[in-house]
Image (cartoon, helix red, strand yellow):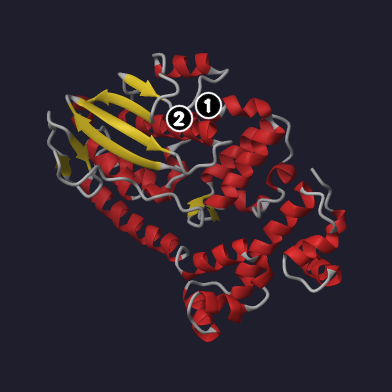
Amino acid sequence: MSLAQSETAGALRADGGLTVGDRPQPRLSPIPNWNVRHGIAGVRRLAQLAGEQGMALETCLDGTGIAPAMLDGDEVDILVEQEIRLIRKLLLALPQARGMGLDLGLRHQLTDFGIWGYALISSRTLREAFQVCLRYIDLCCVFGKLACEESGGEVRVRFDYDQVPADIRPFVVERDAGAIAAVQRQICGVALPLRHVDLAYPRPAHAARLAAHFGLQPRYDAPGSMLVVASQVFDQPLPQANDATLRMCDAECRKLLARRQAYSGVAARVRDIILRCPAEALDMEAVAARLCMTGRTLRRHLSEQGTTFRALRDEVLQMLAEELLRTTPMKLDEVAERLGYSDSAAFSHAFKRWKGVAPRALGRS
């Protein structure tokens, strides 16, 4: 149901409410959690950009834990942490890509986002579509928190990306802004005229490209990143609105979100412990004790989430091993010790099981 406009300070909330005055604050999308999962669409677009810049797919994905074959799947999920690793690797290898975040975002199609995209396009108004967007924000590739506030005849879409690593933050903000613009244009049929754009980082070398896209000069080094549009456009009917389709899509979005969030339970806590204390990863009982449960209970929880302690351990240790071998001067026995192996031979055996090659075959970047 669309929300009534308000000329007093208020906020458009994903739960269908509008806060006014000193009542509840604007509804934010969930705080970033790098252990949650995203669909593969964002990674697919990143790999496409890397290929256009001359970077081989295998090189692009190496060390991220993402296999090339995963890009061909429509229902493949990856960890946000893996996508961060890929973005960081891309920007280090291809400095020119730092100015391509907006263009990358603009490439996104509604079909990239599966059922979430269909839910948006089936909404009756842009206001209703934005409610759906916020409610199921974890089903798309956006990294930060989003809030939508309304007052004085304006809607302000705020981007809170403080928890995104600083070295990739401008790229991610511009990519996500481009993706939102692309989705909005496909939903409405036309681009919305912007009144103001604030960006919470210094003016980049590609500022002219940003100004050309936004149709105005953004304000840089602002307190926060924000897009501002007129309130009236939020209540215009959408051309492909369909209540029955929206109800079906909403139900499917709830199911999909529940499946992804399930991975963020005990399994995510196990991954966190292994990341922080990899030397304990070889002992499930030690990890279970840190979670105040027995090994048997931990095994049951992980089984309910469709995974095992060994699978999580191997996933994290492989990722850490590749990063240490490629980006640090550590010797093989030092890496083995850091990851909790008794000696380099035990580590080499595990590495061959993961990668099919000895760790010494891995070149350093």
Give the number of callouts: 2
Horizontal arrangement in the rendering, residue 96 relative to residue 31 (left or right): right
Any part of residue 357 in sight: no
Q: Earlier in the sequence, mark 2 or mark 1?
A: 1
Q: What residue is drawn where x is 38% and y is 36%?
A: 159
* Residue 98 x/y as whole percent: 60, 28
Asked if residue 135 is positioned above or below residue 127 in the image, the reply reads: below
User: Mark 1 packing: few (<14 Cα in 10 Å), some, or many (20+)?
Assistant: some
Locate residue 192: give its quadrant.
top left
Name the residue nearer the viewer: 283 or 238: 283
Q: The disc labelled 2 sits on which kind of residue?
A: Gly
Circle 2 is placed at which residue position?
A: 178
Circle 1 is placed at which residue position?
A: 103
Q: The disc labelled 1 sits on which kind of residue?
A: Asp
* Residue 8 x/y as whole percent: 12, 31
Q: What residue is drawn where x is 52% and y is 55%?
A: 77
Q: What residue is drawn where x is 33% and y is 20%?
A: 196
* Residue 363 x/y as whole percent: 84, 48
**Quarter that holds the C terminus:** top right
**Mark 2 and mark 1: Cα distance apart in space:** 7 Å
Name the residue nearer the viewer: 224 or 251: 224
**Quarter that holds the N terminus:** top left
Q: Secondary structure at mark 2?
A: helix
Locate residue 89: give its quadrant.
top right
Horizontal arrangement in the rendering, residue 132 relative to residue 59 (left or right): left
For the residues bearing labels 2 and 1, Cβ distance under 8 angstroms:
yes
* Residue 91 x/y as whole percent: 65, 34
